[in-house]
Amino acid sequence: MTLPDRRSVLALGAAGLACLAVSPSALPAHAQGFTPGLVYAVGQKFDKSFNEGALAGAERFKAASGVPYLEYLPASTAQFAQAVTSLLRRGVTDLATIGFYYAAPLAMLAPKHPAVRFTLVDAVVEAANVQSVTFKEQEGSFLVGVLAALASQSGTVGFIGALDIPLIRKFIAGFEQGARHARPDATVLVNFVGTTPAAFNDPTTGAEVAKAQFQRGADVVFAGAGVSNFGIFAATNDAGRLAIGVDSNQNHLYPGRILTSMLKRVDLAVESAFQAGRVGRWTPGVRALGLAEGGVDYAVDENNRSLLTPAMLEAVEAARRDIVARRITVTA
Protein backbone atom coordinates (compact mmCIF):
# COMPACT_ATOMS: atom_id res chain seq x y z
CA MET A 1 0.00 0.00 0.00
CA THR A 2 1.39 3.38 -1.01
CA LEU A 3 -0.08 6.50 0.55
CA PRO A 4 0.92 10.18 0.33
CA ASP A 5 3.77 11.15 2.63
CA ARG A 6 1.60 13.63 4.46
CA ARG A 7 -0.43 10.71 5.77
CA SER A 8 2.30 10.11 8.31
CA VAL A 9 -0.09 9.12 11.07
CA LEU A 10 -0.21 5.57 9.69
CA ALA A 11 3.55 5.35 9.56
CA LEU A 12 3.73 6.62 13.11
CA GLY A 13 1.27 3.95 14.17
CA ALA A 14 3.42 1.25 12.60
CA ALA A 15 6.55 2.72 14.13
CA GLY A 16 4.93 2.73 17.54
CA LEU A 17 4.19 -0.97 17.15
CA ALA A 18 7.71 -1.70 15.96
CA CYS A 19 9.20 -0.12 19.04
CA LEU A 20 7.46 -2.77 21.14
CA ALA A 21 9.57 -5.50 19.55
CA VAL A 22 12.17 -6.55 22.11
CA SER A 23 14.61 -9.42 22.44
CA PRO A 24 13.35 -12.62 24.10
CA SER A 25 15.64 -12.05 27.08
CA ALA A 26 13.84 -8.79 27.79
CA LEU A 27 10.39 -10.36 27.86
CA PRO A 28 8.41 -10.68 31.10
CA ALA A 29 8.19 -14.17 32.56
CA HIS A 30 4.66 -14.84 31.29
CA ALA A 31 5.68 -14.16 27.68
CA GLN A 32 7.88 -17.24 27.59
CA GLY A 33 4.64 -19.23 27.16
CA PHE A 34 3.11 -16.73 24.75
CA THR A 35 1.38 -18.23 21.69
CA PRO A 36 -0.81 -16.00 19.48
CA GLY A 37 -3.72 -17.25 17.42
CA LEU A 38 -6.10 -15.87 14.82
CA VAL A 39 -9.70 -16.82 13.99
CA TYR A 40 -10.63 -15.33 10.63
CA ALA A 41 -14.00 -14.07 9.55
CA VAL A 42 -16.08 -16.55 7.58
CA GLY A 43 -15.12 -16.40 3.92
CA GLN A 44 -11.78 -16.48 2.14
CA LYS A 45 -8.41 -16.08 3.80
CA PHE A 46 -7.04 -14.22 0.78
CA ASP A 47 -10.07 -12.00 0.24
CA LYS A 48 -8.14 -8.80 -0.63
CA SER A 49 -10.13 -7.26 2.20
CA PHE A 50 -10.90 -7.90 5.88
CA ASN A 51 -9.29 -11.30 6.40
CA GLU A 52 -6.25 -10.50 4.35
CA GLY A 53 -5.77 -7.38 6.44
CA ALA A 54 -5.80 -9.49 9.60
CA LEU A 55 -3.34 -11.88 7.98
CA ALA A 56 -1.02 -9.00 7.06
CA GLY A 57 -0.97 -7.82 10.67
CA ALA A 58 -0.19 -11.31 11.96
CA GLU A 59 2.54 -11.80 9.37
CA ARG A 60 4.10 -8.44 10.22
CA PHE A 61 4.13 -9.39 13.89
CA LYS A 62 5.76 -12.74 13.06
CA ALA A 63 8.43 -11.06 10.92
CA ALA A 64 9.26 -8.51 13.62
CA SER A 65 9.22 -10.87 16.60
CA GLY A 66 10.12 -14.24 15.20
CA VAL A 67 7.08 -15.67 17.02
CA PRO A 68 4.79 -17.86 14.87
CA TYR A 69 1.01 -17.78 15.18
CA LEU A 70 -1.75 -20.37 14.79
CA GLU A 71 -4.83 -19.77 12.66
CA TYR A 72 -8.31 -21.12 11.93
CA LEU A 73 -10.67 -20.27 9.06
CA PRO A 74 -14.25 -21.25 10.02
CA ALA A 75 -16.56 -22.42 7.26
CA SER A 76 -19.50 -20.86 9.09
CA THR A 77 -20.19 -18.78 12.16
CA ALA A 78 -21.42 -21.96 13.88
CA GLN A 79 -17.82 -23.20 13.88
CA PHE A 80 -16.57 -20.42 16.15
CA ALA A 81 -16.58 -22.49 19.36
CA GLN A 82 -14.84 -25.31 17.50
CA ALA A 83 -12.21 -22.87 16.23
CA VAL A 84 -11.51 -21.45 19.68
CA THR A 85 -11.38 -24.89 21.31
CA SER A 86 -9.00 -26.18 18.66
CA LEU A 87 -6.59 -23.28 19.03
CA LEU A 88 -6.64 -23.30 22.82
CA ARG A 89 -5.86 -27.01 22.82
CA ARG A 90 -2.80 -26.16 20.74
CA GLY A 91 -1.62 -23.73 23.40
CA VAL A 92 -2.85 -20.35 22.21
CA THR A 93 -2.65 -17.72 24.95
CA ASP A 94 -3.64 -14.62 22.93
CA LEU A 95 -6.47 -14.99 20.42
CA ALA A 96 -7.61 -12.38 17.89
CA THR A 97 -11.09 -12.99 16.48
CA ILE A 98 -12.18 -11.17 13.33
CA GLY A 99 -15.84 -10.35 12.77
CA PHE A 100 -18.84 -8.71 14.42
CA TYR A 101 -20.83 -11.95 14.44
CA TYR A 102 -18.40 -13.52 16.92
CA ALA A 103 -19.50 -11.16 19.70
CA ALA A 104 -22.29 -13.34 21.10
CA PRO A 105 -20.37 -16.65 21.15
CA LEU A 106 -17.25 -14.93 22.51
CA ALA A 107 -19.25 -13.39 25.35
CA MET A 108 -20.15 -16.95 26.38
CA LEU A 109 -16.72 -18.49 25.83
CA ALA A 110 -14.37 -15.84 27.24
CA PRO A 111 -15.37 -16.22 30.92
CA LYS A 112 -14.68 -19.97 30.64
CA HIS A 113 -11.05 -19.25 29.70
CA PRO A 114 -10.01 -16.40 32.03
CA ALA A 115 -6.28 -16.90 31.40
CA VAL A 116 -6.65 -16.30 27.65
CA ARG A 117 -6.41 -12.78 26.25
CA PHE A 118 -9.08 -12.37 23.56
CA THR A 119 -9.10 -9.49 21.07
CA LEU A 120 -12.37 -9.03 19.15
CA VAL A 121 -12.27 -6.92 16.01
CA ASP A 122 -15.43 -5.09 14.89
CA ALA A 123 -17.69 -5.57 17.90
CA VAL A 124 -17.79 -5.09 21.67
CA VAL A 125 -17.80 -7.73 24.38
CA GLU A 126 -17.51 -6.59 27.97
CA ALA A 127 -15.38 -9.12 29.82
CA ALA A 128 -12.27 -9.02 31.99
CA ASN A 129 -10.21 -10.84 29.36
CA VAL A 130 -11.54 -9.28 26.15
CA GLN A 131 -10.21 -6.27 24.27
CA SER A 132 -12.75 -4.97 21.74
CA VAL A 133 -11.35 -3.05 18.77
CA THR A 134 -13.87 -1.01 16.81
CA PHE A 135 -13.40 1.54 14.06
CA LYS A 136 -14.92 4.90 13.25
CA GLU A 137 -15.91 3.70 9.80
CA GLN A 138 -18.03 6.79 9.34
CA GLU A 139 -14.91 9.01 9.32
CA GLY A 140 -13.11 7.08 6.60
CA SER A 141 -16.36 6.77 4.65
CA PHE A 142 -16.84 10.54 4.84
CA LEU A 143 -13.54 11.01 3.02
CA VAL A 144 -14.36 8.59 0.21
CA GLY A 145 -17.82 10.16 0.00
CA VAL A 146 -16.14 13.49 -0.73
CA LEU A 147 -14.06 11.88 -3.48
CA ALA A 148 -17.04 10.01 -4.94
CA ALA A 149 -19.17 13.16 -5.23
CA LEU A 150 -16.36 15.16 -6.80
CA ALA A 151 -15.55 12.39 -9.29
CA SER A 152 -19.17 11.83 -10.29
CA GLN A 153 -20.35 13.27 -13.58
CA SER A 154 -24.00 12.34 -13.06
CA GLY A 155 -24.33 13.64 -9.51
CA THR A 156 -25.54 10.20 -8.41
CA VAL A 157 -23.33 7.89 -6.36
CA GLY A 158 -24.12 4.58 -4.72
CA PHE A 159 -23.32 2.44 -1.71
CA ILE A 160 -23.63 -1.35 -1.88
CA GLY A 161 -23.43 -3.11 1.46
CA ALA A 162 -23.46 -6.81 2.21
CA LEU A 163 -26.50 -6.62 4.52
CA ASP A 164 -28.39 -4.06 6.57
CA ILE A 165 -26.75 -4.10 10.01
CA PRO A 166 -25.57 -1.32 12.35
CA LEU A 167 -21.93 -1.82 11.32
CA ILE A 168 -22.70 -1.28 7.63
CA ARG A 169 -24.93 1.67 8.50
CA LYS A 170 -21.84 3.46 9.88
CA PHE A 171 -20.27 3.26 6.42
CA ILE A 172 -23.47 4.51 4.81
CA ALA A 173 -23.85 7.43 7.22
CA GLY A 174 -20.32 8.67 6.67
CA PHE A 175 -20.48 8.18 2.91
CA GLU A 176 -23.71 10.15 2.59
CA GLN A 177 -22.42 12.98 4.80
CA GLY A 178 -19.16 13.20 2.87
CA ALA A 179 -20.84 13.18 -0.53
CA ARG A 180 -23.24 15.95 0.45
CA HIS A 181 -20.48 17.92 2.17
CA ALA A 182 -18.68 18.09 -1.17
CA ARG A 183 -21.80 18.36 -3.32
CA PRO A 184 -25.02 19.28 -1.50
CA ASP A 185 -27.20 18.24 -4.44
CA ALA A 186 -25.69 14.74 -4.70
CA THR A 187 -28.03 11.76 -4.88
CA VAL A 188 -26.90 8.74 -2.85
CA LEU A 189 -28.34 5.30 -3.65
CA VAL A 190 -28.16 2.52 -1.03
CA ASN A 191 -28.70 -1.19 -1.65
CA PHE A 192 -27.69 -4.48 -0.04
CA VAL A 193 -26.51 -7.80 -1.43
CA GLY A 194 -28.50 -9.98 0.98
CA THR A 195 -29.96 -10.46 4.44
CA THR A 196 -27.56 -12.96 6.07
CA PRO A 197 -23.75 -13.09 6.54
CA ALA A 198 -23.64 -15.14 3.32
CA ALA A 199 -24.08 -11.80 1.54
CA PHE A 200 -20.38 -11.10 2.22
CA ASN A 201 -19.55 -14.00 -0.14
CA ASP A 202 -21.90 -13.54 -3.10
CA PRO A 203 -20.11 -11.82 -6.03
CA THR A 204 -22.84 -12.79 -8.50
CA THR A 205 -25.57 -10.91 -6.62
CA GLY A 206 -23.13 -8.09 -5.91
CA ALA A 207 -22.67 -7.60 -9.64
CA GLU A 208 -26.43 -7.53 -10.22
CA VAL A 209 -26.96 -4.91 -7.50
CA ALA A 210 -24.23 -2.76 -9.05
CA LYS A 211 -25.81 -3.01 -12.51
CA ALA A 212 -29.14 -1.91 -11.03
CA GLN A 213 -27.51 1.16 -9.49
CA PHE A 214 -25.83 2.02 -12.80
CA GLN A 215 -29.24 1.87 -14.50
CA ARG A 216 -30.48 4.42 -11.96
CA GLY A 217 -27.68 6.82 -12.85
CA ALA A 218 -24.90 6.03 -10.40
CA ASP A 219 -21.44 6.38 -11.89
CA VAL A 220 -19.42 5.85 -8.67
CA VAL A 221 -20.27 3.03 -6.23
CA PHE A 222 -18.78 2.35 -2.81
CA ALA A 223 -18.56 -1.42 -2.36
CA GLY A 224 -18.79 -2.51 1.28
CA ALA A 225 -19.58 -6.18 0.83
CA GLY A 226 -16.52 -8.35 1.50
CA VAL A 227 -15.87 -10.95 -1.19
CA SER A 228 -19.04 -9.76 -2.97
CA ASN A 229 -16.96 -6.72 -3.92
CA PHE A 230 -15.32 -8.84 -6.62
CA GLY A 231 -18.63 -8.98 -8.50
CA ILE A 232 -19.29 -5.28 -7.92
CA PHE A 233 -15.86 -4.38 -9.28
CA ALA A 234 -16.27 -6.60 -12.35
CA ALA A 235 -19.64 -5.00 -13.15
CA THR A 236 -18.11 -1.56 -12.64
CA ASN A 237 -15.30 -2.35 -15.04
CA ASP A 238 -17.69 -3.73 -17.67
CA ALA A 239 -19.89 -0.63 -17.43
CA GLY A 240 -16.99 1.83 -17.56
CA ARG A 241 -17.92 3.33 -14.17
CA LEU A 242 -15.91 3.84 -10.96
CA ALA A 243 -15.92 1.85 -7.73
CA ILE A 244 -14.52 2.38 -4.24
CA GLY A 245 -12.95 -0.52 -2.34
CA VAL A 246 -13.08 -1.20 1.37
CA ASP A 247 -11.04 -2.44 4.34
CA SER A 248 -7.76 -3.14 2.49
CA ASN A 249 -6.30 -1.29 -0.49
CA GLN A 250 -8.21 -2.79 -3.43
CA ASN A 251 -7.10 -0.24 -6.03
CA HIS A 252 -4.91 -2.78 -7.83
CA LEU A 253 -7.79 -5.14 -8.60
CA TYR A 254 -9.01 -2.93 -11.45
CA PRO A 255 -6.45 -0.15 -12.02
CA GLY A 256 -8.10 2.99 -13.31
CA ARG A 257 -11.57 1.81 -12.32
CA ILE A 258 -11.28 1.90 -8.53
CA LEU A 259 -11.35 5.53 -7.46
CA THR A 260 -9.90 4.76 -4.03
CA SER A 261 -10.33 2.32 -1.14
CA MET A 262 -11.58 3.12 2.36
CA LEU A 263 -8.89 1.63 4.57
CA LYS A 264 -9.85 -0.04 7.81
CA ARG A 265 -6.64 -0.99 9.59
CA VAL A 266 -7.49 -4.47 10.81
CA ASP A 267 -3.81 -5.24 10.30
CA LEU A 268 -2.81 -2.74 12.98
CA ALA A 269 -5.46 -4.08 15.37
CA VAL A 270 -4.11 -7.63 15.11
CA GLU A 271 -0.44 -6.68 15.13
CA SER A 272 -0.76 -4.38 18.13
CA ALA A 273 -2.79 -6.95 20.10
CA PHE A 274 -0.11 -9.59 19.57
CA GLN A 275 2.73 -7.20 20.37
CA ALA A 276 1.01 -5.99 23.52
CA GLY A 277 0.35 -9.55 24.69
CA ARG A 278 3.94 -10.54 24.03
CA VAL A 279 5.44 -7.74 26.16
CA GLY A 280 2.80 -7.78 28.90
CA ARG A 281 1.03 -4.55 27.91
CA TRP A 282 -2.26 -6.00 26.67
CA THR A 283 -5.32 -4.59 28.44
CA PRO A 284 -9.05 -5.37 28.19
CA GLY A 285 -11.61 -2.75 27.26
CA VAL A 286 -12.72 -0.92 24.12
CA ARG A 287 -10.49 0.80 21.56
CA ALA A 288 -12.20 2.94 18.90
CA LEU A 289 -9.89 3.82 16.00
CA GLY A 290 -10.66 6.70 13.66
CA LEU A 291 -8.75 9.19 11.53
CA ALA A 292 -6.86 10.68 14.47
CA GLU A 293 -5.64 7.23 15.54
CA GLY A 294 -4.69 6.08 12.05
CA GLY A 295 -7.40 3.43 12.13
CA VAL A 296 -9.20 4.50 8.94
CA ASP A 297 -8.10 6.34 5.80
CA TYR A 298 -8.31 6.33 2.01
CA ALA A 299 -5.75 4.82 -0.37
CA VAL A 300 -3.71 6.59 -3.03
CA ASP A 301 -1.21 4.68 -5.16
CA GLU A 302 -0.06 4.23 -8.75
CA ASN A 303 -3.33 2.48 -9.63
CA ASN A 304 -5.64 5.41 -8.86
CA ARG A 305 -3.51 8.53 -8.62
CA SER A 306 -4.48 9.70 -12.12
CA LEU A 307 -8.17 9.64 -11.11
CA LEU A 308 -7.68 12.13 -8.28
CA THR A 309 -7.26 15.75 -9.32
CA PRO A 310 -5.39 18.28 -7.18
CA ALA A 311 -8.72 19.92 -6.35
CA MET A 312 -10.17 16.59 -5.17
CA LEU A 313 -7.16 15.88 -2.99
CA GLU A 314 -7.25 19.38 -1.54
CA ALA A 315 -10.93 18.99 -0.67
CA VAL A 316 -10.54 15.58 0.94
CA GLU A 317 -7.49 16.61 2.95
CA ALA A 318 -9.33 19.71 4.17
CA ALA A 319 -12.15 17.43 5.30
CA ARG A 320 -9.65 15.20 7.10
CA ARG A 321 -8.16 18.14 8.99
CA ASP A 322 -11.61 19.37 9.99
CA ILE A 323 -12.68 15.94 11.26
CA VAL A 324 -9.50 15.41 13.28
CA ALA A 325 -9.79 18.95 14.68
CA ARG A 326 -13.47 18.27 15.45
CA ARG A 327 -14.66 21.12 13.29
CA ILE A 328 -16.70 18.47 11.44
CA THR A 329 -18.52 15.81 13.43
CA VAL A 330 -19.35 12.72 11.42
CA THR A 331 -22.38 11.06 12.97
CA ALA A 332 -22.85 7.32 12.83
Image (cartoon, rainbow, N blue to C red):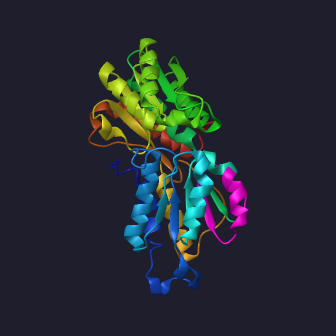
| Above or below for 91 versus 179 | below
| Above or below for 301 versus 270 | above
Determine the image quadrant of residue 18: bottom left
| Above or below for 259 versus 21 | above
Residue 122 visible, this orientation: no
Which segment is the magenta one? 105-127
> In the depicted view, which residue is nearer to us: 175 or 255?
255
In the rendered image, residue 140, in percent from the top left (x then y), is placed at 50, 40
Residue 8 visible, this orientation: yes
Q: Looking at the rendering, in which quadrant would you find the C terminus?
A: top right
> In the depicted view, which residue is nearer to us: 219 or 83?
83
Residue 160 horizontal side relative to residue 130, left or right = left
| Residue at screen point 56% across, 63% down | 86
Is residue 16 highlighted in magenta?
no
| Above or below for 29 versus 19 | below
In the rendered image, residue 94, in percent from the top left (x then y), is placed at 57, 67
Determine the image quadrant of residue 87: bottom right
Residue 251 horizontal side relative to residue 212, left or right = left
| Residue at screen point 39% across, 74% down | 66
| Residue at screen point 30% across, 43% down | 301
